[in-house]
Image (spheres, grey):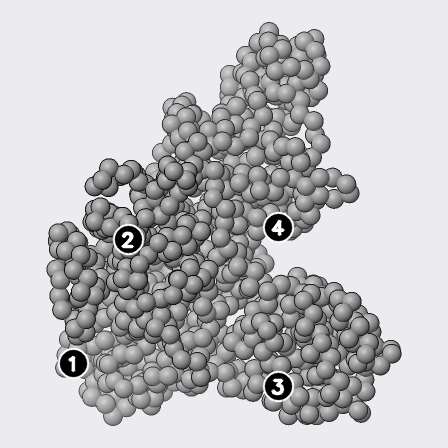
Amino acid sequence: MQKPTQSSIQRAYDIWRTQQQNPLNVMFAPQSVAVIGASEKPHSVGRTLLWNLISNPFGGIVFPVNPQRHSILGIKAYPTIFDVPEPIDLAVIATPASTVPSIIAECVDAGVKGAIILSAGFKEAGAEGITLEQQILEVARRGQMRIIGPNCLGAMSPRTGLNATFASSMARPGNVGFISQSGALCTAILDWSFRENVGFSAFVSLGSMLDVGWGDLIDYLGDDPHTKSIIIYMESIGNARSFLSAAREVALTKPIIVIKAGRSAAAAKAAASHTGALTGSDEVLDAAFRRCGVLRVNSISDLFDMAEVLAKQPRPQGSRLTILTNAGGPGVLATDALIASGGEVAPISEETITSLNQLLPTHWSHGNPIDILGDADPQRYTQALEIAAQDANSDGLLVILTPQAMTDPTQTAEQLKPYAQISGKPILASWMGGADVTAGEMILNRNHIPTYPYPDTAARMFSYMWQSSYNLRGIYETPVMSALDSASGIPDRNCVEKIIQAARQAQRTILTEFESKQILAAYGLPVVSTWVAENEDEAVQCAENIGYPVVLKLFSHTITHKTDVGGVQLNLRDAEAVRRAYHTIESSLNEKLQDPDYSALRKEASALFLGVTVQPMVKMAGYELIIGSSLDAQFGPVLLFGTGGQLVEIFCDRAMPAASVAIALPPLNTTLARRMIEQTQIYKALKGVRGRKSVDMAALEELMVVFSQLVVEQRAIKEIDINPLLASSEQLIILDARIILHEADVKEEQLPKLAIRPYPIQYVSQWQTRNGTTVTIRPIRPEDEPLMVKFHQTLSEQSVYFRYFHLIKLQSRVAHERLTRICFIDYDREIALVVEYQNPETQTREILAVGRLSKIHGTNAAEFAILVCDRFQCQGIGTELLRRLLQISQDEQLTRITADILSDNYAMQKVCENLGFQIERTDDPTVVQAQIEIN
């Protein structure tokens, strides 16, 4: 057994302490439970609930509450919550919806910490139910009470014995956390789990998610040491930002697997009517899941299969699977399923083929799938598997066995036991058949080799594993520093503000092509040179200045699709051609206005033709791309990238193949931008095909990052359509663009919230140390990982000891897996400020100090920690960082800040005292705690 390290012990302690402070503890480990609506009526919810609580000891006391009865099921009952003689941790409510607001108010007044509302008849029932929910939430927030439900089955904690549901039985204890919006599905899953011997660490029905949502429970189960994986049945996302934040935090250490109802329009409508909530765009939801490392599957069986396989086997490092089989047909089925689900058949190296030739009969398949023939004995299986596993081209292995006369399924399984863990490659098995293979399946499963009755299922599971690995790697892969991070790359935000304000003053929401390009250019995006001409003489003059050939386009405040009205004239080679084109555009527009389909435009005739724009005729040797942004009702701004041109309609053209465009959530970094591009069919062409050179992929990624920053920062913008962006090996250039604004009377708080909190640029500023050194204090970024490696190289053992309470070797401190936790942060959860110094001697950037403020889940409190490199200590840096962290705490509406400090770290204690912290002793004589209340 591996000895726990100091860092793992500290991590376990931190999780334990977080759990002690989590307000959801009362939902799963209450010391006292009031059942409000408890009843003697057979088959009623109130009776079933009470019986479940008293027949499954959970270490607490149960108090029935019913004003009509003195006792229920032999237990003394109480008229109201105020009459219960003990303080109540959890109230479980099973009364009519109309009574619930007043009951919650009584619970708040009685000091109840949490409630589970089983009652139905709320927002799923219409406007009256929505009003009831609003009343409940208002009262609950007054008392800081957390609520699960309403319209839910309840919650179980099989490990503690709590069964606060009206299900017919108690789940088995295990290590899977299950969360569902559908109570009926919970009961079906519960029945299935008994047959399949699946156990749960928690089993929760969320219902309408009035208060406690996905994010709350993912956080809670993420900190729960008994939960190894989290599986979810979802109908609506609810608070998208909370879900993404929690999932991204937890998915790196615990798999989160989701089945989301509502892929089809009919299913989405049914889900909406069930939960009373928007289901959102399915494509955007997929993008959100990818962004936070959540794996989406398509069936309930896949949910549990993936929970099992990810618990037993490592995630693959690539998509290439080697298939080993004793029959050709099952191998072909597995291959088809693998390719259809996004996997690849691993190419077999010459070395592997040579080794297999020496082992296998002459007529083996000589390819992948590796058919070792029907007379394969256990020894042939194990030797072939060992050879195939050593092939560097393979990322995982699938062993298929069909029971034939010469086959020994049980002994073959015994021989495979030592190969359960093969140098980071997952191994899966498909033992096909009935009773003859049962013993072999049991042997494999006991030894952490998951088995499947059919090989296509096993191949699909491998593809899911690779998808999970790919998504997680994208989140925590170190990106390249963006040009926006340098002084020369700072966008001209004043220019953008002036353009938007001018349009709003003119009561316009659609910007002209010229204005749109100005905004893009203000962010440094490569825009084709564009001039405005109000008459034909100006058009000729512009053309002369640019140089022939040129393009003329209609300049209008109201018409954005210029080709529809004949508003584009190409390849104009002289002044006469420019004059003709000018008149052609004007006359074509006038003709269109006579068309009944364009009658609405006649009212705005003065804004229709304002002249033309003139731009150079760019050689169309390259690929036409589209980059855009639009709004999703639940996720806010969403980005699009893909094949562009005249036939594309942003976010609307469902006739296009799915892989023609990719969707993602802003903000992007270079890694996420590359992942977005890789999802499209045009990606292969962009890398160079048929003799064409590759597009500058690094420049394209950078362009996407800058575009996403524009979308994040300019909240007044509703939609952006860049189409086309011409991409070739020589250049990237935007030829046309359209920007649509929100209405001027729409306030910022009314806009859809960004699903992912962007980089908090408001906390970036310069400061001087005591010796006059100018530094920049700013929030940390994923791109800072290389700088953090160098920072840790400068630290003395004493500095490391004071920060971490024990010595950690440099190699461990700078490991990528650890630095991902430090640099790749969610600004909704924590803020880490770094002190950056531009070294004039080496012309390189250095990090001199880090100050971190981490929120405690489910509370308004946070903890801080500060680390300053030795050569810049005693320069006021620690004090300035802590002062800024206190200001951020106020901005984030936190109420209490604490830090554990070694008792002999007098310098840090002094810094805290100077800023108003109280220093208190703890149970550990080597540690003191600094704390301050924030007004």
Residue marked by disc 2: 870
> Residue 264 vs residue 386: left or right?
left
Residue marked by disc 1: 86
Residue 456 seen in this snapshot: no
Between disc 3 and disc 1, whose residue precedes? 1
Q: Secondary structure at mark 2?
A: helix
Residue 317 seen in this snapshot: yes
Q: Residue 624 or 65: which is nearer the viewer?
A: 624
Question: Residue 594, percent across and down?
Answer: 63, 20
Between disc 2 and disc 4, whose residue precedes? 4
**Amino acid at pointer 3:** Lys
- Residue that appears at 67% across and 22% down: 617
**Amino acid at pointer 4:** Glu
Q: Secondary structure at mark 4?
A: helix
Residue marked by disc 4: 678
Q: Is residue 838 above or below residue 478?
A: above
Between disc 2 and disc 3, whose residue precedes? 3
Q: Is residue 12 above or below residue 656?
A: below
State the mark number for residue 417: 3
CB-based contact (under 8 Å), mark 3 and mark 4: no
The quadrant where residue 4 appears: bottom left
- Residue that appears at 69% across and 48% down: 684
Mark 4 → mark 1, Cα distance in angstroms? 60 Å
Mark 1 → mark 2, Cα distance in angstroms? 55 Å
Question: Residue 749, percent across and down?
Answer: 33, 43
Mark 2 → mark 3, Cα distance in angstroms? 52 Å
Residue located farthest toward the right when viewing the structure as drawn: 362
